[in-house]
Amino acid sequence: MSNKLDAKIPDGAIGEKWTRFKSSVPLVNPANKRNIEVIVVGTGLAGASAAASLAELGYKVKAFCFQDSPRRAHSIAAQGGINAAKNYQNDGDSVYRLFYDTIKGGDYRAREANVHRLAEVSGNIIDQCVAQGVPFAREYGGLLSNRSFGGTQVQRTFYAAGQTGQQLLLGAYSALQRQVGLGNVTMMTRHEMMDVVMIDGKARGIIARDLISGKLERHFGHAVLLCTGGYGNVFYLSTNAMGSNVTAAWKAHRKGAFFANPCYTQIHPTCIPVSGDHQSKLTLMSESLRNDGRIWVPKKQNDGRPANQIPEDERDYYLERRYPAFGNLVPRDIASRAAKERCDAGYGVGASKLAVYLDYADAIMRYGKIEANKKGLHDASTQDLQAMGKEVVKEKYGNLFDMYKQITGEDPYSMPMRIYPAVHYTMGGLWVDYNLMTTVPGLYALGEANFSDHGANRLGASALMQGLADGYFVLPYTIGAYLAGDIRTKAIPTDAPEFVAAEKEVQDRINQLMNIKGTKSVDYFHKRLGKIMWDKCGMARNEKGLKEAIAEIQALQKEFWSDVRIPGDADEFNPELEKAGRVADFLELGELMCVDALNRNESCGGHFREEYQTEEGEAKRDDENYAYVAAWEFKGQSTFELHKEELIYENIKIAQRSYK
Amino acid sequence: MEGNMNLTLKVWRQKNANSEGRFQDYQVAGISEDMSFLEMFDVLNERLINEGESPVAFDHDCREGICGMCSMYINGEPHGPNKGVTTCQLHMRSFKDGDTITVEPWRAKAFPIVKDLAVNRSAFDRIISAGGYVSVNTGNAQDANALPIPKDNADDAFMAAACIGCGACVAACKNASAMLFTSAKISQLSLLPQGQAERAMRAEKMVAQMDIEGFGACTNTGACEAECPKGISLENIARMNREYYGAVLSSK
């Protein structure tokens, strides 16, 4: 274990750590809270819930988002659901099972204590959201409904049609806006964090840019929380929003926060395939569709027939064939690789041949029969059954089917959808200890921005759970451990030399970008970076490709800094300048991702090294040598030092992950 | 060139809130029908940058119809000609080769222009701050299933809660009224037991804030409902009026 990494995991049995921590963590009394300022960057599930909860406790909070409203953060787009170990279905769920499923789903690369805490607070999240008026799906008896998700054998996923993220975020947003109205939170919209300000080795504020005026601003905080999401947009094409970026986390990294497991990227199996070079983003079709849909390809290579002309016995339901125990509900990394394997072998469908079918014909008939039975129609025709079944499917997944039709121009009720994997989520992120503090004192990372809970692969419906757990129930407690020792620190004036120097550094960088006056747009560089990352650090990686990628990215960095063209001025609303700053950071992060992927000589979860696989093509872990978190320290341009946090499993027997 | 559509765009250009704006014509060629409307603007902007011109500023983020950030007023309709979609989900197959398309920002006093097609919608946030919540601090909740809610009420509340806060209702309304937006939140919370305690106060405060922001009145034209990308119903406005008058009549 590196001596620079102390995870600060409390003593005691796994089930007692969090309870014991909560009863012994130092508190800040209400009068002192009023004098303590906390900066929250990002207003997604983690940021909005943390900002609201801290303000409710009495802290003075300043929250920042780059969008025009905090409600637009990309958590809004999460579709399928949120997990919680409520066991409302009486199907054998428990805190331990959620903990176990998450560790196993993460391919034994997550920290036990954090994951157990996540499972413990999962139920409180549902309670809190319902109390706020989040309209979850319900049964006729008025109680909450659940559905299944990948990587589990119980029904523990709560949902609101295909808009769960939206409803949860609007709940957290309303709590945040309530505190804004009460004057406890100052909300800064259309503001981007440009750097962390360090004073005496602690994070003491940020430099932010007002995106409308272009003006740089200095903001003090006793502590700074980064709730800034993931870095999937390093691939250019991903399911992330256009503005999602790594800049806040990367600036923190350059100021001393270690970046953990950057190579762990989640490629989501069910997205709408790319339709052409104009493509600006990829759209996810919720994993919940795998509950009822069946995934297949033709048994014949390069089969050009339309899907409905391929008879049943000429279809290969490859997930059901390879993984009978979990079938279409295997975890995401496995489903994605299986789709790639079939397409690479020549069985892909659609014009690009880079797609597989997700078929609802069976589900429509099955639901149709159930409806007919409910209505006592025992001689309903196939057509009638289909019509009734379509109604049920529409109620469950209507908005997703509409979205598919809107984008592709095809009707998924009458022909199978075409899907292909796409970059969706990043398990890696800033290294944090049990308190969610990074290696920089006073600087915290919450939600997707940290690395802690999902190991090498995240299970579906667990991102919403983690974001809200961190913001509502974890950070408001753990931050006391730091702030209780800081009650004598007065607000530091922002004319302190450290603030002045940090602002100058940011200003210099903006000037440098504006003065390049090159010939190529920001997107041109971003697309090239994305292609390198997807080809060489995507669903499958190997040593040769990664080494090439590192060299190509370094060359691309030089080209960017000498040839990018940013129109307009720095002192106005200038989306191209915003993008340029973000892409410059992606160019550095992309390099580190490849360095990390090259270091990890094993396959686990979302990280698949072609050299390390079983005879059946499954990921082959190396627990002897790689059961650690790779936390990278920034040592200057293209120089990163590895620190290892050993992962110790005391409560789960580490085993080969099998879903057969 | 990925496609073969050629279009004429008449786009509103305005440097910032304090300057005058005007329409500018652009020809775009080689547009594919699989592109989204925003991807067509990406093509235009890429060309403008290469030609040393200033690209068109427009708001967008998720590009999957849920964040509510995109906001173009296309040929006289917010989010363009199709029902139930946002601009990012509008695809070029909805247009024909040779079409002329006029693109403007949302126009409302309460939504000042930031630049070109981007406007400031923070008035909506302030309406929510005035009362669009249940006052429940973190950690005070009872078990979620201790409060059964009839499915129909939960479903109706969900339908109202589906609002994405894009502001198309305001842009569509000749009075620039924010009644559909405000009523959707009031409806959601008045349909649920959790929202009962603050019901009267919520209606009064949110309506008052709507007026302070400078949104207009409702004259029952129904353009908001027709243009709403999420199908938020006019019934919400009727419910809001009942909530509001009930609150005012009984207020102390």
Image (tube, rainbow, N blue to C red):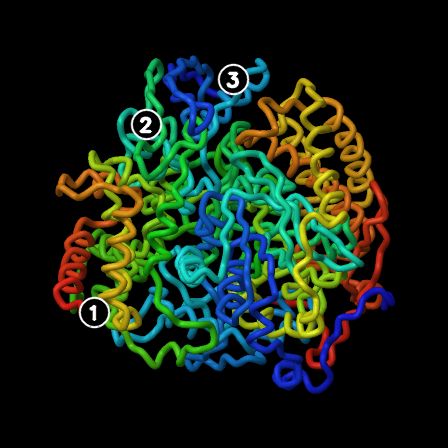
Distance Cα–Cα, label 2 vs label 3: 24 Å
User: Label 3 sits on what residue type?
Assistant: Met
Q: Secondary structure at mark 2?
A: strand
B52 or A310, which is in the foreground?
B52
Which quarter shows the N terminus of chain A?
A: bottom right
Q: Position of residue A11 (x, y in %)?
A: 73, 84
Q: Which residue is mark 1?
A: A374
Q: Position of residue A12 (x, y in %)?
A: 71, 86
Q: Chain of mark 2?
A: B
User: Label 2 sits on what residue type?
Assistant: Ile
Q: Quadrant of residue B172?
A: top left
Q: Position of residue A402 (x, y in %)?
A: 34, 45
Dot placed on the residue nearer the N-terminal end, 2 or 3: 3
Q: Which residue is mark 2?
A: B74
In the image, which is nearer the foreground, mark 2 or mark 1?
2
User: Label 1 sits on what residue type?
Assistant: Lys
Asked if residue A597 can be seen in this view, the reply is: yes
In the image, which is nearer the foreground, mark 1 or mark 3?
3
B122 or A221, which is in the foreground?
A221
Quick check: A305 left or right of A586?
A: left
